[in-house]
Image (tube, helix red, strand yellow):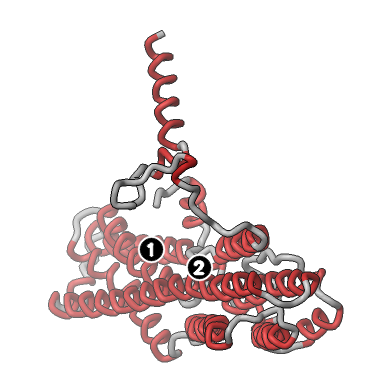
């Protein structure tokens, strides 16, 4: 992942970076003032006030272990959230895809088939958007913030369905039940005339999506224990006071005292600040997972399903029409880039650029 100017601007504008720089500057100035009073003005009051080196080493080691544990915990939440996000997308799409495929064997009316397909696509898109919106925390305080998610045709649903969704306190579960009822009604109308044991896969995919959503909610709704947050904050505050005193005593020069104190405090505070911002990786404030792009990708997949609903059955042209196979009847091997024309375009581009350089 390449870091561009926008990434750096976003990083410098985060609350974690601003607070860390402020704490580092305060500690650096404090260390510089203590060094000036103790060494330059020869007041010599630091030596009896500062504890022994072993105490300082033990404290720094303990603080580093706490920071390492905090960082490992935050990265684990981040990787789990990324996995849940894409698994959720896959479950919704897999369920919609199988239902679209089952409609090809339908014995129902064409009008009912089209109505079923169009409704499924809109409900799946809406359910995914509401699930992602819930994970980023918009339903906790009633205030709209964070990502805004694209939805396929929500206003094209019937009025009763729209009102039922808007009035529900648990919108994701409400749409989930609507989809299941739609499937059962489709079986009754012979829109889904596939064998019941095969049709159960769609219900299983839907259940897997809802289960993944509720597993992801533990990352969005369960914060760190308050006692652990208090202990971490206490360690950081103690380090911000303790480190300047030690630097003022053991380094030489005002600037050296400032720089070492600033660097030590800034790094510890910034590591903790980044870990704190990952307490809910789905939120926009964490600046990590871009859930809105995942929703756009799902909408594109669902739209493609509608476009492919009436595609003819894939087949291989006959040998008499020019398909070359081996004597054993195996498929002829070729290059994907040659088949798509990417290789030819790249070769032509390279040739043109070479001709320009020659000229």
- Residue 60 in the image: x percent, y percent? 22, 75
Please say whether residue 15 is visible from this viewpoint: yes
Q: From the viewer's perspective, is 132 left or right of 163?
A: left
Q: Which residue is mark 2?
A: 286
* Residue at position x 60%, y 81% in the image: 194
Judged left or right of residue 32, residue 252 is left
Q: In this picture, is 211 found above or below 265?
A: below
Looking at marks 1 and 2 on the same chain, the residue that comes earlier in the sequence is marked by: 1
- The residue sitting at 68% across, 88% down in the picture is 184
- 208 with respect to 329 (left or right): right
Neighbour class for label 1 at 10 Å: few (<14), some, many (≥20)?
Answer: many
Residue reaching furthest to the front: 320
Along the viewing direction, whichever of 228 and 31 lies nearer the viewer: 228
Residue toward you, 72 or 94: 94
* Secondary-structure class at tag 2: helix
Query: Residue at coordinates 45% horizontally, 37% vertically from top-left?
Result: 342
Relative to 218, residue 42 above or below: above
Q: Looking at the rendering, which quadrant does residue 117 occupy?
A: bottom right
Which label number is shown at residue 24?
1
Which sits in the foreground, 306 or 18? 306
At horizontal 36% and vertical 68% (from top left) the residue drawn is 271
Image spot of residue 323 (x, y percent) = 43, 43
Query: Element under label 1?
Result: helix
Badge 2 density bin: few <14, some 14–19, many ≥20, Cα 10 Å: some
Q: Residue furthest top?
A: 359
User: Does residue 217 appear in this view?
Assistant: no
| Foreground residue among 269 and 152 | 152
Residue 311 is tagged as none
Please state, as top left, top right, bottom left or bottom right, where the C terminus lies in the image.
top left
């Amino acid at each position: 992942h390449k870091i561009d100017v926008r990434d750096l601007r976003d990083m410098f504008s985060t609350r974690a970076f601003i607070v860390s720089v402020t704490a580092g500057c305060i500690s650096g100035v404090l260390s510089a003032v203590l060094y000036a009073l103790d060494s330059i003005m020869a007041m010599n009051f630091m030596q009896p006030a500062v504890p022994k080196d072993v105490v300082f080493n033990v404290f720094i080691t303990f603080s580093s272990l706490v920071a390492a544990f905090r960082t490992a915990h935050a990265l684990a939440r981040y990787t789990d959230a990324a996995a849940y996000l894409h698994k959720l997308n896959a479950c919704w799409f897999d369920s919609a895809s199988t239902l679209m495929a089952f409609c090809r064997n339908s014995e129902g009316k064409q009008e009912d088939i089209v109505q079923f397909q169009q409704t499924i696509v809109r409900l799946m898109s809406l359910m995914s958007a509401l699930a992602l919106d819930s994970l980023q925390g918009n339903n906790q305080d009633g205030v709209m913030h964070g990502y805004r998610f694209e939805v396929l045709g929500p206003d094209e649903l019937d009025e009763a369905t729209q009102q039922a969704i808007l009035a529900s306190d648990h919108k994701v579960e409400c749409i989930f039940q609507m989809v299941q009822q739609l499937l059962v009604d489709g079986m009754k109308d012979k829109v889904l005339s596939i064998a019941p044991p095969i049709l159960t896969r769609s219900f299983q995919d839907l259940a897997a999506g809802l289960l993944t959503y509720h597993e992801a909610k533990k990352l969005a709704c369960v914060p760190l224990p308050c006692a652990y947050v208090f202990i971490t904050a206490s360690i950081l505050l103690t380090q911000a006071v303790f480190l300047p005193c030690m630097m003022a005593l053991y380094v030489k020069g005002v600037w050296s005292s400032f720089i070492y104190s600033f660097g030590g405090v800034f790094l510890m505070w910034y590591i903790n600040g980044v870990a704190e911002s990952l307490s809910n990786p789905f939120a926009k404030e964490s600046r990590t997972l871009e859930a809105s792009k995942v929703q756009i990708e799902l909408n594109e997949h669902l739209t493609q399903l509608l476009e492919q609903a009436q595609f003819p059955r894939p087949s291989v042209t006959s040998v008499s029409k020019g398909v070359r196979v081996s004597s054993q009847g195996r498929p002829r091997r070729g290059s994907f880039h040659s088949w798509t024309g990417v290789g030819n375009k790249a070769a032509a581009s390279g040739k043109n650029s070479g001709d320009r350089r020659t000229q």
